[in-house]
Image (cartoon, rainbow, N blue to C red):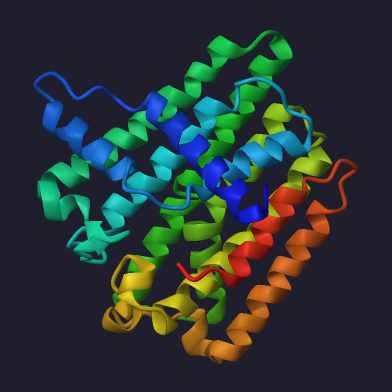
Amino acid sequence: MNFEETLVAKTSRAESVLKKYLPEETGYQKKVLEAMNYSAMAGGKRLRPILMEESFLLFGGQGKVVEPFMAALEMIHNYSLVHDDLPAMDNDEYRRGRKTTWNVYGDGMAVLAGDGLLNLAFETAASAFDMAADQDMVKRVAEAIKVLGCKSGIYGMIGGQAADIEAESGAQITEELLLFIHENKTAALIQAAMMIGAILAGAERSAIEAMERSAYNIGIAFQIQDDILDITSTTEVLGKPVGSDEKNHKLTYVTLHGIEQSKAQVEKLSDEALAILSSFENRNTFLEELVKFLITREK
């Protein structure tokens, strides 16, 4: 298979893993379960679980212990999108070509759906303990859960979101603050994906730290590319409203440096990330191709 066909197959696999851990829509809480599943199954690239599994394979990982973490990370990513879209946040009515969760279920139920996905994520990740065959794997699962919590919490994604809200409310924006927001709001979950994959596979500490650095570059490049697409793409191609950064008066890397310099920075960061990934003894060529793909993606 070529890269595009392989990516489709791996996206389908990541989605099937996620679906396996989503709740059945029954009981008095049925409506919030429907909203959770609507949010989680809204499509998307499934980039983070794919990066996690490919990082797991890069270091010789075997078995299904990575699967609960693949699902958990995608739940966290999607809960963050549900909350991002809320009227109190970005106030977006469409995402990935269809109505956002709050636009279908109301903002109160959307808040609960996001909360539900976040809690279910850690319940799902903890189920990996049941797959641990020995004490060494128990320790790896525990370390992976710690990384998942840190990178998605106040010292990761939520910290970046908080800084982003402060910036929107009139705080002085510097390039340092902007990179802090990108590092935590976007790169942190990519770092979680690649670090957890390496951890569960039993990689050395130096390799885990190298994956964290590589993922930082990938995350910053991904966000800058997202900012570029917000200006250059269309709603039909992107699957969500374009021009929202300008509408919300957001200062982005593109507004600071312009389109051409931003494109050059995406390429530079991606090249640095690839240099790290190609330095390991057993290379994962698909993982490297996936990083290259992020440079030229159109949605």
Q: Residue at x 40, y 77 (%)?
A: 230
Count the numbered circles shown: 0
Q: Is residue 79 left or right of residue 279?
A: left
Q: Is residue 140 left or right of residue 179?
A: right
- In the rendered image, residue 238, in percent from the top left (x then y), is placed at 38, 69
Is residue 217 visible in this depiction of the protein? no
Between 13 and 214, which is closer to the camera in this rendering? 13
The image quadrant of residue 10 is top right
Between 155 and 217, which is closer to the camera in this rendering? 217
Q: Is residue 110 above or below residue 141?
A: below
- In the rendered image, residue 61, in percent from the top left (x then y), is placed at 73, 28
Q: Is residue 87 left or right of residue 202?
A: left
Q: Is residue 201 above or below residue 262?
A: above
Is residue 174 visible in this depiction of the protein? yes
Q: Is residue 106 above or below residue 235?
A: above
Q: Residue at x 58, y 12 (%)?
A: 131
- In the rendered image, residue 6, in percent from the top left (x then y), is placed at 62, 46
Q: Is residue 205 above or below residue 177?
A: above
Between 208 and 156, which is closer to the camera in this rendering? 208
**Residue ranking furthest to the front:** 1
Quarter holding the C terminus is bottom left
Q: Residue at x 59, y 71 (%)?
A: 296
**Residue ranking furthest to the right:** 281
- In the rendered image, residue 8, in percent from the top left (x then y), is placed at 53, 47
